[in-house]
Image (cartoon, rainbow, N blue to C red):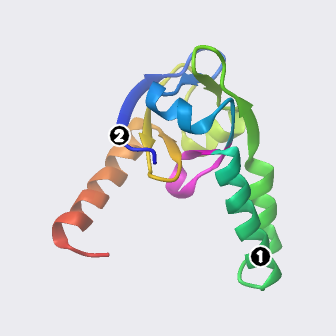
Amino acid sequence: MFVGVYERQLDERGRVALPSTFRGELGEHCYLFIGDDGCVSIRSVASFDEQANELIGQVKRGELSRNRQRAFSSSASQATIDKQGRVTIDARLRDHAGIEPQAAVMVLGSLDQIEIWEPEAYRINEEAGQDEIASGSK
């Protein structure tokens, strides 16, 4: 499980250092892809494969469109975690999340995946989630 939130900085190559507590769970490789609500998501290879197989099943059952499958798969890229614990976020994923080169980002654990957020977008989503918890809504 991935938990916690960390402020990080992208370097000039679009790399971000993942928290050391996240790295062991990921292994040497992971997948980055378009995440929900405007973030970049990161999953371990096994978790990504599970999610992809679930998506394939949903498309075959007619629950989701092939366009959704195409958009998901074309957004994904396999990444290697370097010796400093960094992964590269490609330009297309940075654009999706509104993250500028060399900008501050929020890296957070979202239980089954890691999310990378532009700080203001994260703050807005965090407040909405906290309001839901406080009000007891689902």
Residue 115 at x, y percent in the picture = 50, 44
Residue 57 is labelled as 1
Q: In this view, does 126 lie to the left or right of 14?
A: left
What percent of the width, then of the height, locates residue 14? 63, 23
Q: Residue at x 77, y 76 (%)?
A: 57
In magenta stretch: residue 33: yes
* Residue corresponding to mark 2: 4
Q: Where is residue 126 in the image (x, y as percent from the top left)?
A: 32, 51
Taking depth in this image into account, of 120 and 55 the one nearest to the observer is: 55
Say whether residue 97 is visible.
Answer: yes
Residue occupying image coordinates x 46% and y 48%: 1
* Label 1 crowd (10 A; few <14 / some 14-19 / many >=20): few
Which sits earlier in the primary sequence, circle 2 or circle 1? Answer: 2
Residue 66 sits in which quadrant?
bottom right
Direction bottom: furthest residue: 62
Quadrant location of residue 87?
Answer: top right
Q: Is 92 left or right of 10, judged from the image as shown? A: right
Give the residue displayed 60% in from the left and 37% down from the top.
26
Q: In which quarter of the image is the C terminus?
A: bottom left
- Specify whether residue 99 is in view: no
- First to last magenta residue range: 32-43
Q: How far apart are marks 2 and 1 (CA)?
A: 32 Å
Residue 86: percent from the left, percent from the top? 60, 22
Q: Which residue is drawn at 46% across and 37% down?
A: 118
The answer to which of 124 and 88 lies nearer the viewer is 88
Placement of 89 over or under 93, stated as above or below: above
